[in-house]
Amino acid sequence: MALLPVAIFAGIAILFYAAIFQGDPSVVPSAMIGHPVPQFSLPPVEGLDRPGLASADFGHGTPVIVNVWASWCVPCRAEAPLLDLLRTRTAVPIFGINYKDDPDAARTFLAQLGNPFTRVGADSKGQSSIDWGVYGVPETYVVDGKGRIIYKHVGPIDADLIESEILPTISKAAMAP
């Protein structure tokens, strides 16, 4: 009888250990996969020469990449050159959602690191990002030509991810009827 609490504790410890060290932390299941982009309308980043972003900008037959970023996000700085590389590797537009950011800081970020975005919506309160299912910045999505979210990556993208995941997902989405 005295070993029962020890056995229960050991069982719980094993479950926690397995949960913590199992799988890739950037692969976070999203309830949005396979669903249309949420209804939203974001104004442009103040003073930026790009239009804002809304749900009406999706579903016109062309896949789209969406990147959620912020100037204060260190991993966003690291992935910025890769987003520009991605822009040159595909004809698919890249839309940005600027998450809870200062407009001056966002413009400076893009001026220094390049602006791969066709459209950039300012999500100053973060509500639209929550509706997308954002856990934290950066996050990258692929939306198919029908306006459905078909891919999500949590964390900064890298060259391997572009080759192994994002470009193949875009190709599949472009070939879908």
Image (cartoon, rainbow, N blue to C red):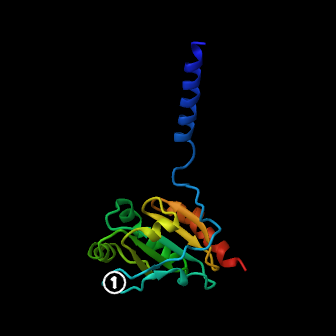
Residue that appears at 43% across and 73% down = 97
Depth check: give the residue in front, 143 or 134: 134
Instruction: From the top left corner, tell me how far across and down residue 79 is, in percent.
Output: 42, 65
Q: How many marks?
A: 1
Q: Is residue 144 left or right of residue 123?
A: right
**Local SS, label 1:** loop
Residue that appears at 30% across and 84% down = 47
Work out which quarter of the rendered image holds the N terminus and state it.
top right
Instruction: From the top left corner, tell me how far across and down residue 51 is, in percent.
Output: 42, 86
Depth check: give the residue in front, 158 or 30: 30
Residue that appears at 33% across and 70% down = 101
**Is 106 rendered above or below residue 20?**
below
Residue under circle 1? 48
Q: Quadrant of residue 72?
A: bottom left
Instruction: From the top left corner, tell me how far across and down residue 163 is, in percent.
Output: 56, 65
Q: Quadrant of residue 115?
A: bottom left
**Is 157 rendered above or below residue 109?**
above
Q: Residues within 10 Å of mark 1 (few under 14, many from 20)?
A: some
Q: Is residue 48 left or right of residue 140?
A: left
Q: Is residue 63 left or right of residue 102?
A: right
Residue at the top extreme of this rendering: 2
Instruction: From the top left corner, tell me how far across and down residue 177 is, in percent.
Output: 73, 80
Residue at the right extreme of this rendering: 177
Kind of residue at badge 1: Leu
Residue that appears at 55% across and 40% down = 19
Q: Quadrant of residue 136?
A: bottom left
Depth check: give the residue in front, 145 or 159: 145
Depth check: give the residue in front, 96 or 81: 96
